[in-house]
Image: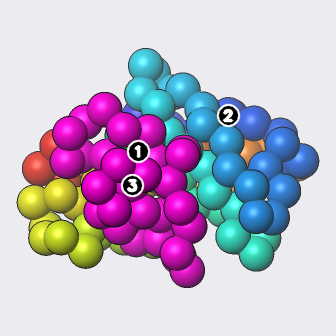
């Protein structure tokens, strides 16, 4: 993804909610934490199968529902080591629409 792409209406992801979207065949989950939007690659890099949309929120992180790996929503860093870091994406709002942009970080799975 090299440009911003409209993925949802802002009202679809109210504070405390999440939504999985697909952009260029890539699943990404949007999280609205107290009005701030975050976007993270939806598959846990540990097994590459578990959707993080089902994870438990823990502050500004999401824990994988299978093995508990925690990913920081701002940085993509994993609490189990840098080899498990995942991608996070730029998010912006324009006229009530949520747009996703390129990844903010590079990971070994990028």
For label 1, the SS is: strand
In the picture of the structure, the residue carrying the numbered disc 3 is 64
| CA–CA distance in space, label 3 to label 1 | 12 Å
For label 2, the SS is: strand
In the rendered structure, the answer to whether residue 105 lies left or right of residue 93 reads left
41 w.r.t. 14: above or below: above
Image coordinates of residue 52 in percent, x first then y, are 46, 47
- N-terminal of the pair, mark 2 or mark 3, is 2
Q: Which mark is residue 41?
A: 1
Q: Nearer the viewer, residue 95 or 59?
A: 59
Residue drawn where x is 50% and y is 54% of the image: 55
Residue drawn where x is 39% and y is 55% of the image: 64
* Magenta stretch in the rendered image: 44-72
Q: Which mark is residue 7?
A: 2
Residue drawn where x is 78% and y is 70% of the image: 35
| CA–CA distance in space, label 2 to label 3 | 23 Å
Look at the image and say whether residue 61 sits in the magenta stretch: yes
Residue 22 position by quadrant: top right
Q: Which mark is residue 78?
A: none
| Mark 1, other Cα within 10 Å: few <14 / some 14–19 / many ≥20 | many
State the quadrant of the N terminus.
top left
| Mark 3, other Cα within 10 Å: few <14 / some 14–19 / many ≥20 | many
Is residue 38 in sight in this rendering?
yes
In the rendered structure, the answer to whether residue 76 lies left or right of residue 20 reads left
Which of discs 3 and 1 lies nearer the camera? The answer is 3
Image coordinates of residue 72 in percent, x first then y, are 40, 71
- N-terminal of the pair, mark 3 or mark 1, is 1
Q: Residue lying at the far front in this picture: please name it.
A: 66
């Amino acid at each position: 993804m090299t440009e911003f792409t409209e993925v949802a209406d802002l009202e679809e992801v109210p504070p405390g909610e999440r939504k999985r979207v697909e952009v260029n065949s890539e699943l990404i989950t949007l999280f609205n934490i107290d009005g701030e939007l975050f976007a993270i690659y939806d598959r846990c890099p540990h097994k590459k199968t578990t959707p993080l949309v089902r994870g438990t929120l823990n502050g500004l992180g999401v824990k994988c529902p299978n093995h508990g790996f925690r990913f920081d929503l701002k940085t993509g860093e994993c609490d189990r080591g840098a080899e498990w870091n995942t991608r996070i994406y730029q998010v912006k709002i324009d006229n009530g629409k949520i747009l996703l942009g390129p990844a903010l970080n590079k990971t070994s799975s990028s």
